[in-house]
Image (tube, rainbow, N blue to C red):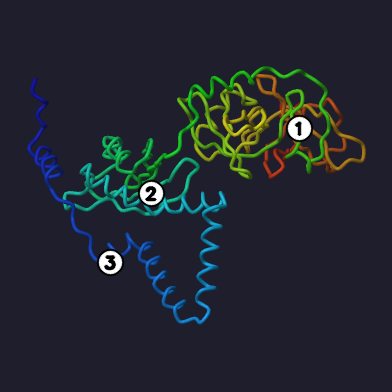
């Protein structure tokens, strides 16, 4: 069966020109900008060698440089940072090569401009400016070609909601949470035993041991969704990744509020870190949203109290309540309405009022 014919002659000529048209040669200024990091490194190394050669104690300087390089190579955090920065330099070249091979260029042969490349937990994020004649759909159609060109495992194409000419490419180099890993971890997703809460000082929340369903109070942001079922949360303080599903939200109906990448949340971390499987984020609260919780602890004379909430799986979340003049009339067992705020010690309550007052209003 013959392929469908183009609807008009201009469409046919445009496709033919894109297929056989060459990529335009960059000007010297554009070429220097694309290779700026390599040129700066080459110039710096050349200048360094010339400067060291003029120093009488050149051997000691070379020994110090060798020791510094050895520390960077052997110290894992420094090595990972160096490799990540190197990929941020390599990836724009591979994206341009992929665009040239996939015919993603204007009719004049101009490739999309790489605006910025940043590190991400699973790879790199590339911000592109599409020239006239190219669009985000071109990257979607050529995604497999771009994955191969970038030596990556996967790639996500995200067009800008406000500006059609801006496109974001997420080059994924490290594997994500697989369905097998999620299935192996769901054994820990059982309802917790209901026991009276224990007031814990805010300074010790990060190292609180897991006990009767109570986990470490954390803050994080939504990283990505997996099949619209599970989500990855990145801890803002430790960069550890946790997974959670709809039932792990305090209010499951708030699922639409956490579908956007970058949404700030507070949660409790469950499970012992073993380095192989991601831990579970339970009792998830969306920062800036209003919730209702039961006041379970407000010791006389203490500068703080605790509000308790619980997700559908039974995992509780203790929210820190600062005691002020408005909280003097509260007592244990009161249901309070509050807005969630997050700090490095987890969630705390703001704009606290009695729930009965809200309903009456």
**Which labelled disc corresponds to residue 209?**
1
Instruction: Measure the alpha-carbon separation of dots 2 and 1.
Output: 42 Å
Q: Which residue is mark 2?
A: 127
- Secondary element under disc 3, as helix, strand or loop, is helix
Q: Is residue 303 left or right of residue 352?
A: right
Locate residue 49, reporting x and y percent.
42, 73
First in residue order: circle 3 vs circle 2: 3
- Say above or below: 112 vs 242: below
Query: What residue sits 30% from the left and 36% below the top?
Result: 143
**Front-most of residues 220 and 79:** 79
Q: Looking at the image, is mark 3 or mark 2 nearer the viewer?
A: 3
Locate residue 101, reporting x and y percent.
22, 44
**Front-most of residues 120 and 251:** 120
Instruction: Measure the alpha-carbon separation of dots 3 and 2.
Output: 20 Å
Place residue 27 in its image quadrant.
bottom left
Q: Which residue is mark 3?
A: 29
Q: Looking at the rendering, in which quadrant would you find the C terminus?
A: top right
Query: What residue sits 39% from the left and 72% below the top?
Result: 46
First in residue order: circle 3 vs circle 1: 3
**Front-most of residues 259 and 152:** 152
Q: Looking at the image, is mark 2 or mark 1 nearer the viewer?
A: 1
Which residue is most to the front? Answer: 59
Locate residue 100, reporting x and y percent.
23, 47
Callout 2 environment at 10 Å: few (<14), some (14 to 19), or many (20+)?
many
């Amino acid at each position: 069966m013959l392929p469908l014919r183009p609807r008009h002659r201009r469409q046919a000529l445009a496709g033919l020109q894109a297929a056989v048209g060459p990529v335009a040669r960059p000007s010297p200024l554009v070429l220097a900008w694309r290779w700026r990091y390599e040129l700066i490194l080459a110039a710096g190394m050349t200048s360094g060698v010339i400067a060291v050669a003029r120093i009488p104690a050149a051997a000691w300087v070379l020994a110090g440089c060798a020791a510094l390089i050895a520390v960077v190579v052997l110290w894992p955090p420094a090595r990972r940072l160096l490799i990540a920065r190197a990929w941020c330099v390599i990836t724009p070249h591979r994206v341009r090569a992929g665009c040239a091979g996939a015919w993603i260029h204007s009719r004049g042969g101009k490739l999309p401009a790489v605006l910025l490349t940043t590190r991400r937990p699973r790879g790199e994020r590339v911000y592109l400016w599409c020239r006239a004649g190219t669009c985000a759909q071109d990257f979607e159609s050529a995604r497999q070609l771009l994955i191969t060109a970038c030596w990556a495992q996967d790639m996500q194409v995200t067009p800008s909601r406000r500006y059609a000419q801006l496109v974001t490419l997420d080059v994924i180099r490290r594997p994500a949470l697989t369905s097998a890993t999620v299935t192996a971890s769901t054994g820990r997703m059982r309802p917790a035993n209901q026991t009276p809460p224990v007031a814990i000082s805010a300074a010790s929340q990060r190292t609180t041991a897991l006990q009767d369903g109570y986990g470490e109070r954390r803050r994080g942001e939504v990283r990505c969704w997996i099949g619209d079922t599970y989500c990855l949360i990145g801890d803002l303080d430790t960069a550890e990744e946790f997974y959670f599903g709809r039932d792990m939200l305090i209010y499951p109906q708030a699922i639409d509020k956490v579908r956007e990448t970058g949404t700030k949340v507070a949660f409790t971390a469950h499970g012992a870190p073993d380095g192989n499987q991601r831990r579970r984020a339970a009792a998830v609260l969306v920062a800036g949203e209003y919730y209702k919780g039961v006041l379970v602890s407000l010791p006389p004379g203490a500068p703080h109290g605790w509000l308790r909430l619980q997700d559908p799986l039974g995992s509780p979340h203790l929210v820190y309540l600062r005691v002020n003049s408005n909280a003097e009339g509260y007592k244990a067992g009161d249901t309070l309405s509050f807005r969630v705020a997050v700090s490095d010690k987890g969630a705390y309550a703001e704009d606290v009022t009695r729930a009965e007052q809200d309903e009456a209003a």
